[in-house]
Every structure is written in C-alpha cells, then in structure tokens.
Image (cartoon, rainbow, N blue to C red):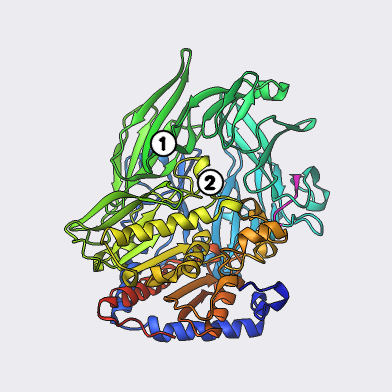
Amino acid sequence: MTLAQDDDPYLWLEEVHDAAAMEWVEARNAETAATLQVGEDHDALRARLLAALESDARIPFGDLRGGFVYNLWQDGTNPRGLWRRTPVAAYAEGKPEWETLLDLDALGAAEEENWVFKGAACAPNGSSRCLLSLSRGGADAVVLREFDIATRRFVADGFMLPEAKGGGSWLDEDTLLVYSDFGPGTMTDSGYARTARRWHRGEGIDEAETVAEIPISDVGLFPTVVRTPEGSYPLLMRAVDFFSIEYSLLTDEGPKLLPLPQKVGVDAILNDALIVRLREDWRVGDETYRSGELLAVPLDGLLAGTPRPARLISPDPRTTIEDVKRSGEHLLVHMLDNVTSRLYLLTPGEAGWQQREIDVRPLGSVRHITTDAFSEHWFFAYQDFITPLTLFSAHGRSTPRAVMEQPGFFDATGLAVRQLEATSADGTRVPYFLVGPEDAEADGDAPVLLYAYGGFQVSETPVYSAARGMGWLETGGTLVVANIRGGGEFGPAWHQAALRENRMRAYEDFAAVAEDLIERGITRPSRLGIMGGSNGGLLVGAAVTQRPELYGAVVSLVPLLDMRRYHLLLAGASWMAEYGNPDDPEQWAWISRYSPYQNIDPEADYPSMLITTSTRDDRVHPGHARKMVARLREYEHPVYYFENIEGGHAGAATPEHTAKLQALVYTYLQRTLMAAADGSGADQQ
C-alpha cells in the first residue's frame, strides 16, 4: 500500500502547536500514562533512574580551555544545570574545585524561559567574554548571548542573536564570525544558514559584512575558528550535502578554497597542517590516498594548489578511526578494532611521527576524550556494558592514571559480554554484542532487547547505561547491540554500503541478527523486543512493517517514519544524501520499499509498539511519530504513544524528563516481553 501525499488524512498532525494536534497528543499521552506509567514497579524504577541521573557520584565531564575544565552539572536542586569550572590541575587530581558561572534554573525563573544550555564559545587571549548558546526546551535552535565570566553577568549591549539554528566563533575579542537566520533568503532548504558574517562590536547585525554565501539547495554554511599556539584559522565549511563538505580558509582577501576532496573531515590543525580523515579515495599526483586514512596536509601546499599529504594511519577493513583530537603537540587518536576501542598518541618529530598505543581494557569503549591545543593535559573515560565509567588523566606522553571512578548503578553480578556474528542476506558478516546471564541456557526463552542505529556513519560501541542495567539487565533481560551496515564501525565503506538505493542492506542486517538470536536458541519472536532512536527509530519501524512475525515488542524513539515527506519537514532535506529524494520517481521506488508509514498493513498481526517524540524536536519533526500512531490506531493495531513537550531531539531536557521517559520505555518492555512466557502482557490498545 502506497499513499500519495494528497491522500494522507493525517497531515494536520504536522502542525506542531495546532490546538487540535495538541489535544490529540494530550489524549494519547493520557492513555499511555493510565496503562504504563502506573504501578509500584514503574514508580520504583523511575525513582532509581532519577537518583542515578542526579547522583553526586557521577563523573563531571567537561571542556578543557584556558587552564580550566568547564562543566554543566544537573541534579535535583538544579535540573536545568549549573555552568561551572575548575582549575585543570585540580581536575587532573580527581579533586575538582568548582566555581559556578551561571545558574540556568535561576536564569530561567527570572526570564520565564525554559532555557537549556547548549554550549559556550569563549574569546581568545585570556578574555573573560563568552558567547553562550541557549535553547528553549532543548531545540536545536539557540539564542546567542554574550556573557562575562569575570562579572558572572550577560554583557549589556553585548553580542546577541535571536533564536535560530546558528552559532558564532571569535575572530578577536571584539569580532565574531557568525552564521544564523538573518532574514528572508538567508536559510537553506534544510533550515540552516547560507551566509556567514564578520560582526564587529558596536555594529548592528544588518551592518555586518557578509564574507561567504552558498546556494539555497546546499545543507548549510558552518564557519568556525580553529585556534592553536601557531595561530588562528578561520574555516568556512560549506556542506553541499550531509557528507560532502568544501573547506575554505577566510583570509584578508576573502575565502580561499582548499583543494581537498569533498568527502573529508578536518579534525585538527597541528604545525600548520590540516589533520584530515578521508571518506573517499584522493588522488594526488601519482599517489592514491585511500578512504578511511588519516593524513597531515600542510596548509601552505593546499593554498598553493599543490597538496603534500603525509599518511599518519591507514586502517585495515576491520578497523576505523573514530575520533582525533589535538592535545598540545600531540594527536590523540581513538580507533575501533572490530568495534572495540584502541587509543594512540601520535607525536611529530624530526624523524617523522611517533606512535604509541595507550593501554585500554578489552571489549569496551573510550568516551569523553577531553583535550586542548594549548595544553598538554588530556583526559578520557573507559567503560563497557557492565563496567562503570572511569576517568583517566595524563600529561603529554605520561601514562594515564585513573582519577575518578563512577559507582555501579545496577547489579551486574553474573552478567557476561560476548561478541557474536550473524550472516546477512548477501553473505556479509555482521557483528553484535550480547550482554546477559553468564550461565544462560539456549532454551529459546530469554527476553532479549535488540538495539541498533545503522546510519550516518555512527558507530554503536559498548556503553554502560544505568537505564539499560536497571530497567532490563538487572531484571533478567538480555541486551543485544548490533553493528549493522550504515554505521561507522568499519569505516566509510561500512556506511556507504547501505546508502540510498542500498538502504535495504541495513534492514537485512538487522533481521539477520534477529534470526541468528532465534537460531542459536537464545530467544524466540514473542520474547524479542527491538529499539532504536531517530534513524534507529526508522530502522525498527521498517523492521516491524517488513517482518512483524520476528518481534514481540517495538520501541521507536524520536523517529523518522514518513519517508515520502521527510525532506519537507524541518532538517529533512539535509539527509537526502543518506536516503535519497522521494520526489524523484526512481528514488521513491527504493524508499517506498521500507518507508514505515506507507507500508502499514491493515491486516498484519503486528506486535505492540511504543512510539515517542518531543514537541520541541526541531530536527526530526514530531509529525512522523504522530501520524504513524494515528494510522496504526486507525487499523486497530496495538500502539502506545508518548510526546514530551520539552526535550528537543534528545527527547528530554532535564534529569526528571529523562527518568520519566526511560521508566516508561523499560516498564513497557518488561510488561510486554517478560510476561510473554505465559501469554500475558501489557494491556493492548
């Protein structure tokens, strides 16, 4: 069944704040609350989750700059958060000495706004001025306001831009490089800025000089200033599509295009060389540099049109470079080797680059790498599915040492982690992690939650999650995290294998993992739940409409679901490089095969579903979730719905919001899958 746009009776639900649409939302929320958000089990779980989210024992991760570590701390007293800082030396000893810079709760109360902190960009040369990004309700759109750390106040008549999807960087203490909505014609079809302006203190924004402009069909223009001890580098990033970027250096004569391939990422600048990761092959003279490699490319050669790349790391087919950051005179490189972390310190010298591997534990992941180009201090955290986060501190080439350890928030006794593989429809090996009881029997009875993402070159690695632990593992559930194509677990090729016309490969990989779990005798369909968010919400929506007999429960969070109209809603046009253009009949032929909203079968025997979103999500339109639920209800398929009024694309803006959402999700999964052995389950709607 394929609906034409004109045949869609639920378009009115795309009117986000329309009275009728919000009345519908409130009615669905009330139905879900009456069934799932009640009971001692739910209330106890919600209280435990909130306690973990607000615990003083959490590690306070932050940003390193100017001799301080800056952190946003949210707890029961300050659910919106305290923006604060500590001297880096104290942080490196695991004994931070915090000073509060801004109380977001007090600010919101005084201004009658539901402010959510979205970051700070601070001026150079020891200035106390910072440009803060504040969001209403967690949306991507932010208000930019100048703040003085010395006085702990916003600057009267300082730099300020109204709410928009934009940002700013400091060229000097009195000049910004900004991108924003400057009025009609200044935003792309994707809803991002298409101009960049040089804005001097004392000027009105309309007086600011436009330094660059891109076509309206591009995704957006994103300028930034990379500041290093060697100098400052204003870069203009023109996103032609989601994966193709043109880099230009803003000079006194204007922007100068850097002759890099379009599918490339610039991670750092060190010794006047751009540190880049290739996402496509690059032919320079007689040499071909392969997709996935890490290169150092001197800037003078790029500006002269004669690039001189030097190879730093060349991953093999089962490894990939996940993250690169500069720390003083070094590069910290995080790699994945068969989806587990390896960490390297690279240092340039007269004899070339020296490489040293940093010891990290097996079957886990490195997170929260914190560095600064002006500091030799660096930090990272380690975790795995059942090992809580530990923060490590190092200086230069010193051996990292543990300085903070987060306690366990759930009982992991008897749990084990394994890495297995399934074989997809075309013979591709698809790895997945399985976390569950060490002594589990292969009797097909384990309640299993299968999670995946499978898009935008995002890697799914081992993560210690209090919510998964309390809500699922601790109650006897088994967790599976699948590394399907479309992700970044094995580099650009793994992602590109499931793009556009090949999108079905991601869904075939996901189904192959589900089938493998059943064939191994780990679970059976009635005990197998699936969950994903955003693109992962699309994944599970496609999975259940294609193979409903494989699953017993479905959780789709802030999802894309109507792929006929996704490119017309909010940031959707920016994702056509991932999915294709549904207005092109040939491309719609691929997309229509999996678009969940268009493939709901009135006669199918679907498992129950829980679909959630946020009214303030200005990235993935809440209309996707609303319309899917309306159509499922029309055909009397079992579905629950929850829409948080705040939260943006994260789905929640405060610890309380997060605990409420997580408790809902795991209460649903427990009552649906863990009761499946005796045929009972949560009341169906």
Which quarter of the rendering shows the C terminus?
bottom left
> Count of labels shown?
2
Q: Quadrant of residue 224?
A: top right
When the figure is inspected, residue 360 is found, relative to residue 385, above or below; the finding is above
Q: Is residue 339 magenta?
A: no
| Residue pictured at 49% horizontal, 40% vertical | 491
* Residue 571 can be seen, yes or no: no
Q: Quadrant of the N terminus?
A: bottom right
Q: Which residue is mark 2?
A: 497
CA–CA distance between discs 2 and 1?
35 Å
Give residue 238's quadrant in the image.
top right
Magenta extent: 190-198
Residue picked out by circle 1: 378
Q: Tell which circle, 2 or 1, labels the residue nearer the N-terminal end.
A: 1
In the displayed structure image, the side of residue 587 where residue 445 appears, left or right: left
In the image, residue 28 lies at what x, y percent? 51, 83
In the rendered image, residue 568, in percent from the top left (x then y), is placed at: 70, 64
Q: Amino acid at mark 1?
A: Trp
Instruction: Specify whether 61 is left or right of 234.
Output: left
Identify the residue at horizontal 32%, vertical 73% (top origin): 673
What amino acid does circle 2 point to? Ala
| Residue 446 visible at all | yes
